[in-house]
Structure formats: C-alpha cells, structure tokens
Amino acid sequence: MIAQRISTAGIGLLAAILTGCFSPSSEAVGTAAPAPGIPGSSPNAKVNAFFDMGPTAAEIKLPADQVFPRGRVFPFAYYSIGGGSEAKRGELLPEAEKRADQKEIMEAGTTLIGPQYELNGEAVALAREYRRQTVYTIIPEIDGAKLVGSRAFDKYNAANPLPREKIAASIAAQVKAVADNPEIAWWDITPEELRYWRPVEVEYLKLATDTIRANDPLQRPIMMYEPGHRDANSLTKLTPCLDFIAKGMYTNYSSKGDERVWTRYSTQEAVKARELLKRPEIAILALPEMFVEPKTAAERAMIPVWVRHDVYSALTAGAQGVLVFSASKRPNFSSRPIYLDAYKTVASELTGKLDLGTVFLFGKRMDDLEFQNISGPETVKLTMKNGDLTLPATAMANIAFNRLRYVILVNSSPETVTGMVSGLPYGNDVTVRDLWSDRPAWSAPEGEFEVELPPWGVRAFVLGRGQ
C-alpha cells in the first residue's frame, strides 16, 4: 500500500500537514510575488545574460479581464460547482447549501467556472455575480431529444446518416442566444469522449465546431473532454477541430495511485500531440480528480500531498490551466472537504499573491539548469498495457519571467529525493529564495544549491540578482 512505502521524511511532512504546521499557501510568510528584476543591474555580465531574457509582465498585451488563451487570466476551475448531492447522483443541493458551496469555491482562487453541463444559465449568472467567466456547454438536440451519452451516435451510419441540418440548427440557436454574453470564455462540446475511429462522430465534431464558429462573433475557443487513456497519436485525431487538449489525468481512478508520474506522462502526451499537429496555439488543460474516495485512512491523509503533486506535475510538464473534476457533491465521498481545501490552497498560489499561473502561462521555458540526483530514486516505473515506461523520478521546470528565474521541482516517487540544482552563474550576485518558506534568501556563489524533496513533494524557488 502507499502508506507503507513512505519514508521517515514523508511521515514528517504528513504529520506537519495534519497538525497544521505546514501551510504552503499564498498567505504564508515569504510568498509575496517577487518584483521584476532590473535589466543589466549586475556587474557580472554572465549574471545579466542569465536573467535578461524571457518576457516581463508588462509585455503581456492580452486583456487582464479575460481568461487564457484570449486573456492573461490563468484558468483554474471546477466542474459542477454547487452541483450534486450526498444522497443521490444528479440530485441538486438545497439552495442555501448550494450558494454556500459556490461562495466558498469562488472566493478561493477560482478564475473560471468549469462546465456545468445543463446548468449553463446558472453558470453565467454565477460568473456575472463574481466577475468571472464561464465555460458554456453545448448540448445538441434532434427533434427535441438531447444527444447525450457515449452511445448517442450508435444508430447513425451510411444507411441512416447523421441529421446534419437538425443538429446544426440546434447548435446555432444555442450559440446565438448567448453569443453577446461577455461572461462566456469558452464553449464546451458534448457528447464527450467522441470516438475518433467512428466517422460519424468525427463528422459530428466538425459540424458542431464549424457551426459554433459560424455563429460566434467573438470566436471563442472550443474544448471537449477526452478520456485519460488516450496517447499523443490518439489525441491528434479530434484536436484539429478544437482549441484545447482537455484529457483526464485521474490517478486513483486510473489505478495509478502508486505511480503518480502518470500525471506528468499524461501531460507530456498532450504536448506531443500539439507538436505533431504543428499547432502551438492549442492550449493544454490539466484535469485532476476530485471524486475517488480513498480506501484507507492512511491514503485519506495523503490527499493534500496528492493534490499538490498532481497539479504541479502537470504544470511542470506544460499544462496551461486546471479544471478539477469535480466540485459536485456525491454519495460516499466524505473526503471531498479535504480535497477541496487542498485544491483551494494550490489555486491561491497560482492565481493569488504569488501569481505562479502567470509564470507558467507566459514565462520562457529554459534548459540551462540541471537537477542532479544525490540520494533517493533516480527513476520511477509507469505500468502501461503496451510495456512499462521508466521516467525520471524528479521533474524540473526552469522558467524565465520578469527578469527572474523560477525553478519548480516535483518528486514523483514515494521516497525522499535529494539533489542539486546546478548551472547558475558563479558568484555572489545570484540569490535563491524558497517560495514556500520564511527562510531568508541566500546566495549561490558556486552556481548550485541543494534541494530535498519529500515523497511526492513539490518545491518552488525564485532566483534573482543581488545579495
């Protein structure tokens, strides 16, 4: 079991979380967003060359009130805010409880209201109330009957072709009815999980996306959820019609609870699909899970660690937004408050004072630093149907932004890893600051600094000029 393989350091971290002594949030000491560096402010030319690259916040010209990719706001959303019930799937909460749930989530770093499916009207109203934007779900109808579920197209074939005119008319009417609404950021296509090997479903997706674009004067981007098992080649089949790759990366649901590197691999496959399509403008979304009840008390205690790992693992690998599935309350899911608190903390880091979401979205990915393993596992195994994969245990994002360097490290093993970040310019004019610690900034005169990562741990540092 997971808990049986946690090292002493991991147990210490877990105890700190449970006792409230560990609080990696944007409200913690030492977490105000660093001010931009001053170009050429070091007497060391190599230090200036190291920091004077990548964009600054002032150079981002996208609207500040629009969600990425049309604006600069980092997308952090939950499916089904205020939906569901502990008593019955599909049953809605009483109004007072629903409103309280929505308020809690919307005031905790959430920048976008994720797909609400049939509750589009409520999602738009909620977005207007909290000055946010929302994802609007398209649910086509044929002769008054909604097309829902994975088998919605099974009866259509060469002998019984897709009723294109009726579907197009239904979608066009839905889009036109709300096209002038500024609260809508993205369109969401249903039915989801379309099967790319069935021509009729590919035909439907092209028809649906073409119809949306023909009737949306603002040309807002379009997404559709795809199942987590799809690899890069599979993802290229439907993405040509879409503006996002939105693939599930549900670790526990996918039986990858002991192999959480799955989240990194999943995101890397999406990045690879984008490269194969030669469409760098496609945005990649991380869809982590919030619906699987842990099997044991030990696993339940690991939820805050799991959440941080899974989100930052995906972001380090190239994700550009987070859609948590889902905020819906559901039967036999007593761990929901623990999950939600953990996601709220991560959201506050990405969209609050630290503003790490902007760094991930607009910073320049660099390859001039290296993480050198000192102790702990160097690799981890990912079990796959077509043969196991061996991946580095630790992933690092090295991002230049605002004339600073951000270094984010994610340990995807159940053991403590210690390593050295190296490649910094030599000299006393490079300082390192731990973003989630009150430790004073320190210099790295030898061009390196040591990092300890607890089991499934995440560390973040900002490097700058000055002593």
Image (cartoon, rainbow, N blue to C red):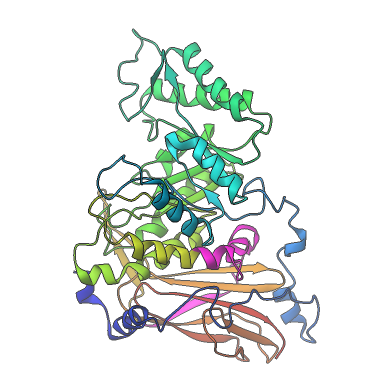
- Pick the front one: 64 or 91: 91
**Residue beneath the point at 39% across and 11% down:** 161
Residue 211 occupies which quadrant of the picture? Answer: top right
Residue drawn at 80 percent across, 82 percent down: 41
* Residue 264 placement (x, y as % from top left): 41, 59
Q: Is residue 459 above or below residue 267?
A: below
Quarter the C terminus occupies:
bottom right
Looking at the image, residue 228 lies above or below residue 146: below
Which sits in the foreground, 177 or 248? 177
In-front residue for pair 133/455: 133
Image quadrant in which the N terminus is located: bottom left
The image shows residue 362 at horizontal and vertical percentages of 65, 59
Question: Horizontally, is 353 left or right of 328 in the view?
Answer: right
Q: Is residue 229 above or below residue 315?
A: above
Above or below for 244 versus 168: below
Q: Percent position (x, y) of residue 230?
A: 36, 43
Q: Quadrant of residue 29?
A: bottom right
**Is 364 included in the stretch rendered in magenta?**
yes
- The region drawn magenta spans 347-375
Q: Is residue 330 magenta?
A: no
